[in-house]
Amino acid sequence: MTELNRTAKFNIGQVVRHRIFPFRGVIFDVDPTFSNTEEWWEAIPEEIRPRKDQPFYHLLAENEETEYVAYVSEQNLLVDESGEPVRHPQVGEFFDQFDTNQGAYLLRSDTTH
């Protein structure tokens, strides 16, 4: 039996995009493995359903039409290379500013996890 790698590939504050669907967002929390409802997981079409034994990320997400909170498996995320901040209205609740050099947000000093 091999030991599972539970080290998250992405960081809180990092801007990412979905590998399949047209949305992007900033990570505000990470679960080391799947931690949502069975109903949520089973609602994903089986051919694209992610494994549960990987990190899952909570994103302040956006697409062309709207902003929302998304829960995405690590296998379905890529680094967003646009260098653009996320327009989600809750960004200020978690982060102070967008670092254009890093393409990531800096956590608010009064935010704890």
Image (cartoon, helix red, strand yellow):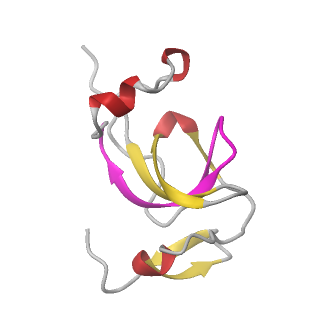
Q: Quadrant of the N terminus?
A: top left
Q: Toward the viewer: 99 or 73?
A: 73
Q: Quadrant of the C terminus?
A: bottom left
> Could you tell whether 50 is left or right of 33 in the image?
right
Residue 112: x percent and y percent? 26, 74
Q: What residue sits 46% from the left and 46% below the top?
A: 9
Q: What residue sits 47% from the left and 74% below the top?
A: 90
Q: Is residue 56 magenta?
A: no
> Could you tell whether 105 is left or right of 2 in the image?
right
Residue 78: x percent and y percent? 62, 45
> Could you tell whether 39 is left or right of 94 in the image?
left
Task: Read off the magenta span.
Answer: 15-33
Q: Is residue 19 magenta?
A: yes
Quadrant of residue 63 within the rendered picture: bottom right
Q: Toward the viewer: 44 or 72?
A: 44
Look at the magenta stretch and give its main secondary structure.
Answer: strand
Q: What residue sits 30% from the left and 39% below the top?
A: 36
In the rendered view, tell whether residue 110 sits above or below residue 20.
below
Say if residue 81 shows up in the picture. yes
Q: What residue sits 71% from the left and 69% below the top?
A: 84
> Could you tell whether 6 is left or right of 10 in the image?
left
